[in-house]
Image (spheres, grey):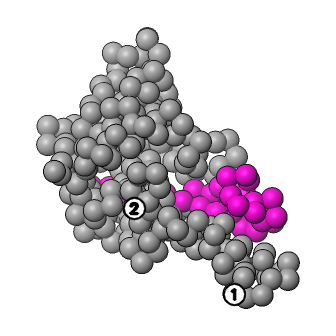
Amino acid sequence: MNFNGHTPNQERSWSRHAARYNDVFLDPYATDVVNPLWQALDAVGDAGAKTAADLGCGTGPLLGPLLGRFRRVVALDFAPGMIERAREQVAEADRARVEFLQRPMDDLADRVGTIDAAVAINSLVMPDVRCIQRTLEAVRACLRPGGVFLGIAPSIDAIQYHTLLLHDQALDHGMEPADAERFAAFHAEHRYYDFAFGRFKFRGLRQKFWHGFELEHRLARAGFRSITVSKVLYPWDDNFAGGAELADCPPSWDWFFRAEP
């Protein structure tokens, strides 16, 4: 049985991970992360009179920053466990300004032309790209004229970059090439990835990972314009295998994008 590209099993898997979400995934909101999202949100004019949508809100880490900038916030997620955790992030005084929706991201027909700023942080990760395309088209339709779509998408390029650095690290420690390749593949967790199609599978979760050029392609195909793609930069820390030894290398990244309807 399929619900717009999301299976009940995926809803349960994401709900199951809600309590330890920040232990499993990189945190783009950490203070030592270089995140273009904040500047892009600050650039939204007259935000205090506008409505933002957190599409795929997860456990709700972005709700506070959005409520601090916008008049109203729509928080959407298809996993009930995520919605439950996100509700806990909203202070009682702000609850009247937040509308929670438990539904897939492509189910926005009743929101056409009502959103000024849509934000999707690591939520454009449906393994079926047809669902992603429907979602992008639905997001574009829900934006008012002059609106903006902002987001972060996990980078498959960064996994390959980490692999390169681990491979060099192993060679520098005297490993033979074949052993260095096995070392890099193991510690970069290649067993979880399909690099050809940018897919990730871990403990019941199935996700899409992105190349920057693919983001531009799919946003443009959905009718967005003025598309810019840049990087969210993560420091080498204990979230990465061998991070301490990679501290002097350029940082890892996810993709940040900004697009207009």
Left or right: 96 as drawn, with respect to 1: right
Quick check: can you spot residue 81? yes
Outermost residue to the bottom: 177
Asked if labels 2 and 1 touch by Cβ distance under 8 angstroms, the answer is no
**Among the 4 quarters of the image, the one containing residue 160:** bottom right
Give the residues drawn in magenta, as a range: 232-261
Q: Is residue 240 above or below residue 167?
A: above
SS label for mark 1 = helix
- Please report whichever mark, 1 or 2, sits nearer to the chain's N-terminal start: 1
- The residue positioned 58% from the left and 49% from the top of the image is 26
Task: Provide the residue designation for mark 2.
Answer: 208
Give the class, few, some or many, for how many residues have Cα within 10 Å of label 2's Cα (few <14, many ≥20). many
Label annotation for residue 178:
1
Q: Quadrant of residue 162?
A: bottom right
Q: Position of residue 47 (x, y in %)?
A: 40, 33
Q: Examine the structure image and report whether residue 223 is included in the region drawn in magenta.
A: no
Residue 257 vs residue 24, the one in the foreground: 24
**Helix, strand, or loop for circle 2?**
strand
Q: Amino acid at mark 1?
A: Ala
Q: Does the magenta-highlighted stretch encompass residue 235? A: yes
Front-lying residue, 93 or 192: 192
User: Label 2 amino acid?
Assistant: Lys
Residue 124 is left or right of residue 8, and the answer is right
Residue 195 spot, x, y in % from top left: 46, 74
Q: Residue at x 30, y 46 (%)?
A: 9
